[in-house]
Amino acid sequence: MELFSAEGYEFARQVLQRGIAAVYLIAFISAANQFPALLGEHGLLPAPRFLERVRGRGIPTLFRWHYSDRFLLAVAWAGAAVAALLVAGLPQAGPPWLPLAAFLLIWFLYLSIVNIGQTFYGFGWESLLLEAGFLAAFLGSTEVAPPVTVLFLFRWLVFRLEFGAGLIKMRGDPVWRNLTALYYHHETQPMPNPASWFFHHLPKPLHKAEVLGNHFAQLVVPFFLFFPQPVAGIAALVVIGTQAWLVLSGNFAWLNILTILLAFSTVGDSTIQALLPGARFSAPDPSATPVWFAVVVLAVTALMLYWAWDPLRNLFSRDQLMNASFNRWHLSNAYGAFGSITRIRNEVVIEGTLDEPGPAAQWREYGFKGKPGDPARMPRQFAPYHLRLDWLMWFLALGASGGSWFPVLVQKLLDGDPRTLALLRTDPFAGIPPRWIRVRVYRYRFSTWAERRAERVWWVREPSGFLLEPVRRPEA
């Protein structure tokens, strides 16, 4: 089994297994907190109705035969419990079948949620987490050395993720090619964080250097992930560094954190020991690998290589797809982000009143947890936690259709629905249903240094029209 086993990658395995499990833990907690209000029996897009529409299509999910909010919560908390055990490293301390079973379990539990999550789970990092969790199942336990083929599949995943993102940028918005993308991105990204204001105000020549560095990291560096050490390890450190820069400058759920974790698949123990001379890692005997485990891993490797053709072809297609799944299991996907950059930031602001509409009406604004609202409120850090409603509100402001869920959101606010209100940061009516609701559109921009000092605001906004004229709560 010596050719099958990758010696000197124990640190990589620990980071991959524990780190990926930690992201699953966050994802399951997010599902328990948000899914019932967004997609539950009485949610904005009720999952039972979706399941009725897709019945007979063979979508892999535990909820095919039965959905209830109670069952969803049981699945989410069970997944969180198993993920927590993996973060602690307990299954990995046993025989290789134990972490294999644990990871496959949380992978399928989360797949069951994603496959009925509709637009609220239509993000590329859902597929990324599913693919990463599936691969992590075959890294084995501390009793065996990490399989070399699985580490290769992780490198192939990082390559697709980075190179695909680089290509979609070069094929997309010209601001990536003329290096001006970051003149706008920090201000118009879906959910700025506390540092985004400062990143936006960096000198423009530095913004151009950032874009150039991004192109190098995504279009050149990924090829070196397949080189021998130490070249592969250095390439991984470049990926980790650029992703850490993105973590500092914005809220992108777990996309960047997970990419950093995946890049460690290329970092050997020797690289870590060079950086931390006192680090010591166990070295399992390659001959201890059970035959059954090798057979299973090689079969899965063959399957993933078979599925690799579609994403490989997609990379070199003129009509490159971004964040696409080519099979219902969300394995061997296409990735990419921000092929186009928004130049202007519009925000949808929901307001309610207890008065009759008119010049004397007092309209009060609902506050969201992550998306901009009150200009004086500093942007918050939420990633790697995913605020799904806030993200959909950003797409709505870009002109995306909210026809299936947004009218329901408005109606639930008119009803004072407690579950829906729990998704928000502030309810200006303290649980009392408003009589009327209207939806305004504002144009936002970051304040200047002078405006920040004088007015203590992070944003400057001006009215840009109405998305929805005042609508009334039906009388009882």
Image: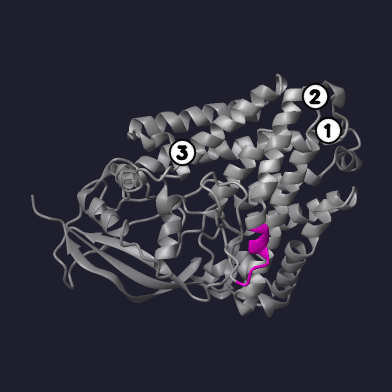
What secondary structure is found at the residue carrying circle 3?
Answer: helix
Q: Marks 2 and 1, how far apart in space?
A: 8 Å
- Pick whichever, 272 or 289, lies toward us: 289
Q: Quadrant of residue 467?
A: bottom left
Q: Marks 1 and 3, how far apart in space?
A: 32 Å
Q: Which mark is residue 322?
A: none
- Pick whichever, 298 or 66, lies toward us: 298
- Is there CB contact under 8 Å for labels 2 and 1? yes
- Pick whichever, 177 or 370, lies toward us: 177
- The percent coordinates of residue 174 (x first, y second) are 62, 79
Amino acid carrying label 3: it is Ser
Amino acid carrying label 1: it is Ser
Q: Is residue 248 visible?
A: no
What secondary structure is found at the residue carrying circle 2?
Answer: loop
The residue that mark 1 highlights is 5
- Pick whichever, 396 or 98, lies toward us: 98
Q: Residue at the location (82% across, 52% down)?
A: 226
Q: Residue at the location (51% across, 46% down)?
A: 328
Residue at the far left: name it: 476
Q: Which residues are magenta?
A: 311-318
Label 1 vs 3, first from the N-terminus: 1
- The percent coordinates of residue 15 (x first, y second) are 72, 37
The residue that mark 3 highlights is 112
Q: Quadrant of residue 182?
A: bottom right
Q: Residue at the location (61% across, 69% down)?
A: 200
